[in-house]
Image (cartoon, rainbow, N blue to C red):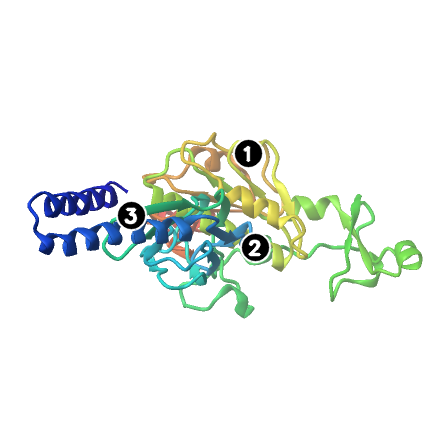
């Protein structure tokens, strides 16, 4: 606006000089400068009056590296803007808006890291071609989006994925990926019901529920919960932010894979009790959101007891030099350390999300045999 006033002032000064010194040739630039300043200012003000910048809300959550749809609608005032650009922190470059009253911008944005992201509002800048008058129209209020850690495949050293039907945890067998329980034992205690799984014996079907609701449900036993593998996430002392992100992705990937196999439990930092997850993945969305918000320095997980018939997979972002002491004290069927930095001298059983999983018990057994 100051440039427009200065330009108009210069034009008026030239006109006064033309009248004072009786120099008609000064009227032409004087009137031109004055008219240019007035027209530019009026055009910009009319275009900015009533202008709106609207960002269409996208989904509240998005997975890392997956496209997040960004939709921005720009509407100017009573006349199209003479020039200017649309500035949005998610676009990364200015979008010209001159000559059009209505413009829509559609783009897919990708977030590389998990966590909560604040989407600040954009800014519409309307200016004349000479930059004499500039008006800024802020966008509507911003929004928040939660970036979830992505799920990656569990890969055995041979290169076969966890979904191929082979045991990617290499040697843990049914004790890790969900052991099949002896359902003929009479002493098994019923804990509840869950949706029927294909292949489950008919003795597990809860026929009263089938007759009442028409939905196939099966009994769930206490011993089955004790035999499910336990995934523990340790974020107390991560080696770096990238290492923490890798550990979170590994924990999420292992949880989903093990749950789909036969069910598992996930123990997050600060929790006293693990969250159970079945093959139907009920409740996974809440756990996925909590994994996205895990921060460095969180309280270490409190593992009071390990599954009697299952395994413990200790996922940590620390720069390990030795086996975590908490894991050493647990007496599980099998124990694994999953970390971006492998333990020296131990064989890699599987890899996931840039982390390596190493079995403890098998290596110890091998060392004892060599010593003998």
The nearer-to-camera label among 1 and 3 is: 3
Is disc 2 surrounded by few (<14), some (14 to 19) or many (20+) residues within 10 Å? many
Q: Name the residue: 13% across, 46% down.
A: 19
Circles 1 and 3, Cβ within 8 Å, touching? The answer is no
Q: Is residue 342 left or right of residue 165?
A: left
Q: Earlier in the sequence, mark 1 or mark 3?
A: 3
Q: Where residue 170 sits in the image (x, y, percent)?
A: 48, 60
Q: Which residue is pictured at 34% across the width and 59% down the height?
A: 95
Residue 257: image quadrant is bottom right
Q: Nearer the viewer, mark 2 or mark 3?
A: 3
Return the residue nearer the eye: 150 or 170.
150
Mark 3 crowdedness (10 Å alpha carbons): few <14, some 14-19, many ≥20: many
Report x, y in % for residue 60. Answer: 55, 49
Label 2 near label 1: C-beta < 8 Å? Answer: no
Q: Residue 274 in the image: state x and y as whole percent.
A: 61, 39
Asked which secondary structure carries label 3, the reply is loop
**Residue 97 makes an appearance in the image:** yes
Residue identified by numbered label 1: 303
Residue drawn at (32%, 49%) of the image: 41
Please say whether residue 346 is visible from this viewpoint: no
> Which residue is denoted by mark 3 in the rendering?
133
Q: Nearer the viewer, mark 1 or mark 2?
A: 2
Q: Is residue 247 above or below residue 91?
A: above
Q: Earlier in the sequence, mark 2 or mark 3?
A: 3
The residue to which callout 2 is attached is 256
Say which quadrant the N terminus sits in.
top left
| CA gap, disc 2 and disc 3 | 57 Å
Q: CA distance from mark 1 to mark 2?
A: 20 Å
- First in residue order: circle 1 vs circle 2: 2
Residue 30 has which mark? Answer: none
Image location of residue 354, percent across then percent down: 37, 55
Residue shown at the point (31%, 47%) measured from the top left: 134
């Amino acid at each position: 606006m100051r440039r427009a006033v200065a330009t108009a002032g210069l034009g008026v000064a030239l006109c006064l000089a033309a009248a004072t010194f009786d120099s008609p040739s000064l009227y032409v630039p004087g009137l031109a400068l004055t008219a240019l300043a007035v027209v530019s200012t009026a055009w910009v003000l009319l275009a900015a009056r009533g202008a709106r910048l609207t960002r269409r809300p996208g989904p509240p959550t998005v997975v890392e590296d997956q496209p997040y749809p960004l939709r921005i609608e720009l509407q100017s005032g009573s006349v199209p803007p003479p020039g200017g650009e649309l500035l949005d922190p998610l676009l990364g470059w200015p979008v010209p808006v001159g000559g059009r009253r209505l413009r829509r911008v559609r783009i897919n944005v990708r977030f590389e890291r998990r966590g909560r992201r604040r989407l600040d509002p954009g800014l519409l800048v309307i200016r004349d071609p000479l930059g004499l008058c500039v008006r800024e129209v802020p966008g509507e209020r911003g929004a928040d989006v939660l970036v979830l850690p992505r799920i990656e495949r569990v890969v055995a050293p041979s290169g076969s994925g966890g979904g191929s039907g082979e045991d990617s945890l290499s040697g843990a067998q049914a004790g890790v990926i969900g052991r099949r329980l002896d359902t003929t034992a009479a002493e098994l205690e019923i804990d509840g019901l869950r949706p029927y799984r294909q292949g489950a014996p008919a003795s597990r079907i809860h026929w009263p529920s089938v007759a009442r609701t028409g939905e196939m449900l099966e009994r769930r036993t206490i011993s089955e919960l004790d035999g499910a593998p336990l995934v523990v996430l340790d974020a107390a002392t991560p080696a770096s932010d990238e290492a923490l992100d890798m550990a979170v992705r590994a924990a999420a990937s292992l949880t989903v894979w093990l749950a789909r196999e036969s069910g598992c439990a996930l123990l997050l930092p600060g929790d006293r009790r693990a969250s159970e997850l079945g093959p139907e993945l009920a409740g996974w969305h809440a756990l996925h959101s909590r994994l996205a918000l895990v921060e460095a320095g969180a309280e270490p997980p409190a593992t009071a007891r390990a599954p009697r018939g299952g395994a413990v997979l200790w996922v940590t972002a620390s720069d390990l030099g030795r086996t975590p002491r908490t894991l050493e004290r647990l007496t599980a069927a099998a124990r694994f350390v999953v970390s971006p930095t492998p333990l020296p001298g131990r064989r890699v059983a599987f890899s996931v999300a840039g982390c390596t999983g190493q079995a403890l018990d098998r290596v110890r057994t091998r060392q004892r045999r060599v010593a003998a």
